[in-house]
Image (cartoon, helix red, strand yellow):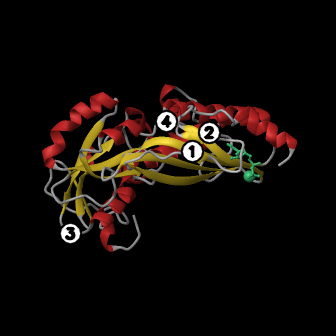
Amino acid sequence: MTASEFDLIQRYFSDLGSRRDDVLLGIGDDAALLQPMAGEVLALCVDTLVGGVHFPQDAPADTVGHKALAVNLSDLAAMGARPAWATLSLTIPAADEDWIAAFSRGFGDLARYHGMALVGGDVTRGSLSITVQAAGFVPRGKALTRRGARPGDAICVSGTLGDAALGLQLWQHGRGDLDQETRWLAGRLHRPTPRVSLGLALRDCATAAIDISDGLAQDLGHVLRASGVGAQLDVDRLPVSTAAVRYATGDERLRHFLSGGDDYELCFTVARSCLHKLDAIASRVGVQITRVGTIQPGVGLDLVHTDRSPARLDLPGYIHFGDRGDRG
Ligand code: ADP
Ligand code: MG
């Protein structure tokens, strides 16, 4: 590493996030030394964001830093894990200090908010790409997985669906800054809020959980396959924001809410006996929770309307994916 790269790390990454007692040795040596908590298991995940693929190249640098960590925090949230440590591998075309400073601010603010320490990383030259690894803790036996959904369980989602995909469309057409609603949708794309406290609150309540990164239909599909069950989804109950209703129009609307990616909400299942706890959890963590369907025996996803008798809706490619291999 050159002297200037060393300076960059010192200046922008050496003291990012929270100080933690379980970091025995952080940034500056060949590896970090970390003290895992007794009685807890480590939840470990990694995600790479490539410029122009996972975020627009012209996205503000602070939002890129935020999002690179947020997508990993979302994975930890879906496991019911409490965030602890992160590493960051940053590949950048040039040492643009303004960009790096803003990136580091976005990353650091979110890390600190969640009590997380940045304990190591790497900086290399190349096309813009960011890899973040995140580690968190969950008491043994308490982790949420994709495997526990049972027939009769309610299917719930946090927040609203399809906002980020609309934010991307607007952004790509230079319309991300028209008014309060388009700015909000763009914010849902660039600055997703990982549902960490919801994940923690669901430890004693949810039977299965996943974060929604590829759209509800596909991600719920992962839960159904892992749990060996099917589901009925009431499409009239899908939680959608007023901004999204304004911009998602026409025949594609339902498909959009079912398959729009990048929302980083949680989809989870709860036993009927636990349903009464959800209102209190929602107000405690400050996140809307909506019941959108029910787990049923068998395979596949039936899309139904509230007021009509159950029938598979005509949405080719989205229904019945339980029988169709990997297709969401
Ligand atoms: P090495 O050559 O041993 O891989 P580096 O020169 O890449 O070491 O990094 C020196 C120290 O700075 C290491 O502790 C490494 O974890 C840390 N580091 C490097 N880049 C980053 C970064 N982007 N964010 C956080 N820590 C970093
Ligand atoms: Mg290195």
Cα distance, mark 3 to mark 2?
42 Å
Q: Position of residue 202 (x, y in %)?
A: 29, 43
| Residue at mark 3 | 298
Cα distance, mark 3 to mark 4?
37 Å
Q: Position of residue 76 (x, y in %)?
A: 44, 47
Sequence order check, earlier mark of 3 and 2: 2
| Residue at mark 4 | 185
Sequence order check, earlier mark of 4 and 2: 2
Q: Nearer the viewer, mark 3 or mark 2?
A: 2
> Label 1 crowding class (10 Å Cα cut-off): few <14, some 14-19, many 20+?
many
| Residue at mark 1 | 86
Up the image or down, 300 lies above or below 129; here it is below
Residue type pointed to by label 1: Ala
Q: Are marks 3 and 4 in contact (CB under 8 Å)?
A: no
Which residue is rendered at x = 86% and y = 46% of the image? 2
Residue located farthest toward the right when viewing the structure as drawn: 3
Q: Nearer the viewer, mark 4 or mark 1?
A: 1
Cα distance, mark 4 to mark 2?
18 Å
Residue type pointed to by label 2: Gly
Q: Are marks 1 and 2 in contact (CB under 8 Å)?
A: no
